[in-house]
Image (tube, rainbow, N blue to C red):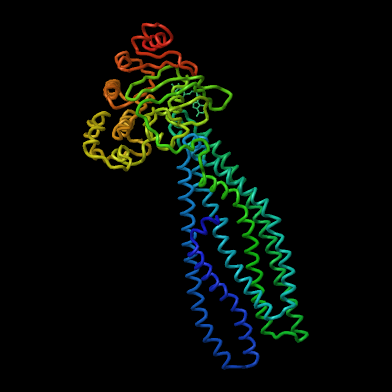
């Protein structure tokens, strides 16, 4: 948190300055009361008038300072929250694909919303209260010494007892707050999951189950919140008792000192006023310190997201793909126990076309993800034009390829924005991409044309239309490597055939197609069919040759077309 406050040093300085002005005015009230009562008791009319005039000016200025201080504090909190959000979000965006997918997206969502809210409520707001009350407390102590030293000494003893409170509750509150943050994150994950599966819920009549599971999670979250609130309540009660004891000590001692003639009645009134300026600020400070300490695990989590650095890919070379992407003796598993790819060697030559086929779950998508720089923790070697992928800048390596998945993600913007992704392209480039992806006729029939909104994740489009937008998105960028991972599966046969054969005839494109669609007309157009079984490549070659060989691919092909 200090990091963000340092970024706003000047703002912080002026906020503290005006906090000091408005805080000192509270303390000065005690001296004003003492002077007023003494003037009244001494029947001093001219002194009384002087005090009244001074008070009018004084209270007007006090109001102005309080307003400026409040404004500056709010503005500073807004600036800090904005910085925390921006740097946390940019840290999240900095994650490698591999590390990003290790967590549920709702976990990031919870950090960006719930955790930052907790930070505001339990750190930033209390911090400025603590600053304000510390100034009031310090100034009150000075005024108290001015009134009477012995009373001040007794007050200090009470305060030392109060110093034990943060130590008493801080650690417990920290643990409870951390549990609450975890519960909130779990709750957000569940809600996101349920809302994403809305359609499944409707068609499988899952409402009762979802409501009960939601209720259980809601209950756990509230229980975690209440557990933290209970510690806060205990902290508040103990702080209150101790702060009251300060006022009681002041009251009784001052009364005794009037009796023995040590102080005046005006000083008693002043001391009662100042003692509340000692007790209340202390109460607030000791209420707030454990709260502020409790956000440490949350701040740590946000800092981890902000300061994320990839430990897997640290290369800096710009990748070049002019000849080959190769894999040698590549083995990989997601959880170490179950091997997904075993000893794979292959070479992808620039501008050639490859179809990767095999039974579901044999590792086709995983192989392509590894080749394009998705995962770093594998055995063997992956090279781009002879350079190990680990020596390359992974951001640039990932940008060399475009993958069109079965489930395309579309932003809630227009078709145009989803294709161009806020980059500039010429009209000619746009028209080519629309034509080659088979989108032209569809867009032509829309009232708003290419500017039509697609809805949340393309909810107003069909699966095939979404895939065509993804194809246009990739083609307009003329990326050297295009991957179709069942990328045309939702498009009607004729359009899919047209798109795929167009891509197969593009001379300046390397194409990797993962397909379950066994059309001999299309498969014949590929330079190489790569057939996989149980995480291994068992056959490679042109379609006609593999059919002639009459081995595993041939049986797979015939089994598929006979289905
Ligand atoms: N992120 C992941 N975490 C853990 N296991 C995974 C993950 N992704 C895939 N797997 C597992 O790895 C194996 C290979 O999956 P992969 O998606 O590569 O197969 P595939 O051949 O592309 O399948 P399909 O043709 O059905 O899309 C499967 O057993 C799958 O369950």
Which of the 4 quarters of the picture holds residue 477? top left
* Residue 119 at least partly seen: yes
The foreground one among 448 and 366 is 366
**Horizontal arrangement in the rendering, residue 258 relative to residue 446 (left or right):** right
Q: Is residue 130 above or below residue 427?
A: below
* Residue at the spot 57% in from the left edge and 55% down from the top edge: 122
Q: Quadrant of residue 453?
A: top left
Say whether residue 494 is left or right of residue 279.
Answer: left
Taking the spot 72% from the left edge, 72% from the top edge, the residue there is: 155
Q: Is residue 193 visible?
A: no
**Residue 353, position in %: x, y?**
33, 21
Position in image of residue 175 (x %, y %): 65, 48
| Quadrant position of the C terminus in the picture | top left
The one nearer the camera, 473 or 449, is 473
In the image, residue 168 lies at what x, y percent?
71, 56
| Residue found at x 47% / y 70% | 68
Image quadrant occupied by the N terminus: bottom right
From what the image shows, is residue 222 above or below residue 468? below
Q: How many marks?
A: 0
Query: Front-most of 492 and 502?
Result: 502
Q: Residue furthest front?
A: 386
**Image location (x, y in percent) of residue 510:** 33, 25
Name the one closer to the observer, 150 or 46.
Answer: 150
């Amino acid at each position: 948190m200090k990091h963000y406050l340092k970024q706003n040093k000047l703002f912080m300085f002026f906020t503290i300055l005006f906090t000091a002005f408005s805080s000192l005015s509270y303390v000065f009230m005690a001296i004003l009361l003492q002077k007023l009562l003494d003037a009244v008791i001494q029947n001093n009319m001219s002194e009384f008038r002087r005090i009244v005039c001074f008070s009018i000016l004084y209270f007007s200025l006090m109001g102005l300072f309080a307003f400026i201080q409040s404004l500056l504090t709010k503005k500073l909190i807004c600036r800090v929250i904005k910085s925390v959000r921006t740097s946390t979000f940019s840290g999240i965006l900095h994650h490698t694909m591999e590390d990003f997918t290790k967590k549920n997206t709702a976990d990031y969502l919870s950090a960006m919303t719930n955790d930052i809210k907790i930070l505001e409520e339990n750190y930033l707001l209390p911090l400025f209260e603590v600053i304000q009350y510390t100034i009031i407390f310090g100034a009150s102590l000075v005024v108290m010494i001015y009134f009477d030293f012995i009373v001040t000494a007794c007050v200090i003893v009470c305060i030392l007892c109060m110093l034990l409170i943060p130590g008493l509750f801080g650690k417990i509150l920290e643990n409870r707050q951390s549990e609450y943050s975890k519960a909130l994150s779990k709750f957000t994950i569940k809600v996101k999951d349920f809302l994403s599966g809305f359609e499944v819920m409707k068609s499988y009549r899952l409402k009762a189950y979802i409501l009960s599971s939601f209720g259980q999670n809601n209950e756990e979250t509230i229980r975690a919140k209440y557990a933290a609130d209970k510690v806060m309540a205990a902290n508040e009660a103990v702080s209150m008792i101790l702060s009251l004891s300060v006022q009681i000590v002041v009251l009784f001692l001052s009364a005794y000192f009037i009796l023995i003639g040590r102080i005046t009645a005006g000083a008693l009134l002043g001391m009662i006023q100042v003692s509340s300026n000692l007790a209340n600020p202390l109460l607030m400070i000791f209420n707030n310190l454990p709260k502020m300490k409790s956000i440490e695990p949350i701040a740590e989590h946000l800092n981890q997201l902000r300061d994320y650095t990839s430990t897997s890919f640290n290369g800096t070379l710009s990748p070049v793909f002019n000849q080959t992407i190769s894999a040698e003796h590549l083995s990989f598993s997601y959880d170490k126990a179950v091997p997904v790819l075993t000893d794979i060697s292959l070479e992808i030559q620039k501008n050639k076309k490859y179809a990767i086929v095999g039974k579901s779950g044999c590792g086709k998508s995983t192989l392509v993800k590894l080749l394009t720089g998705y995962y770093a923790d594998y055995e063997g070697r992956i090279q781009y034009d002879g350079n190990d992928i680990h020596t390359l800048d992974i951001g640039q390596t990932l940008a060399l390829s475009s993958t069109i998945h079965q489930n395309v993600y579309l932003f809630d913007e227009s078709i145009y924005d989803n294709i161009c992704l806020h980059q500039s392209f010429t009209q000619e480039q746009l028209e080519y991409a629309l034509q080659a992806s088979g989108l032209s006729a569809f867009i032509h029939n829309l009232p708003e044309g290419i500017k039509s909104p697609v809805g949340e994740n393309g909810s107003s489009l069909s699966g095939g239309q979404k895939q065509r937008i993804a194809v246009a998105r990739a083609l307009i960028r003329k990326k050297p490597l295009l991957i179709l991972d069942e990328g045309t599966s939702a498009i009607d046969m004729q359009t899919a055939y047209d798109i795929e054969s167009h891509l197969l005839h593009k001379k300046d494109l390397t194409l990797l197609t993962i397909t379950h669609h066994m059309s001999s007309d299309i498969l014949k157009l590929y330079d190489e069919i790569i057939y996989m079984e149980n995480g291994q490549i068992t056959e490679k070659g042109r379609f006609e040759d593999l059919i002639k060989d009459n081995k595993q691919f041939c049986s797979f092909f015939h089994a598929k077309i006979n289905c």
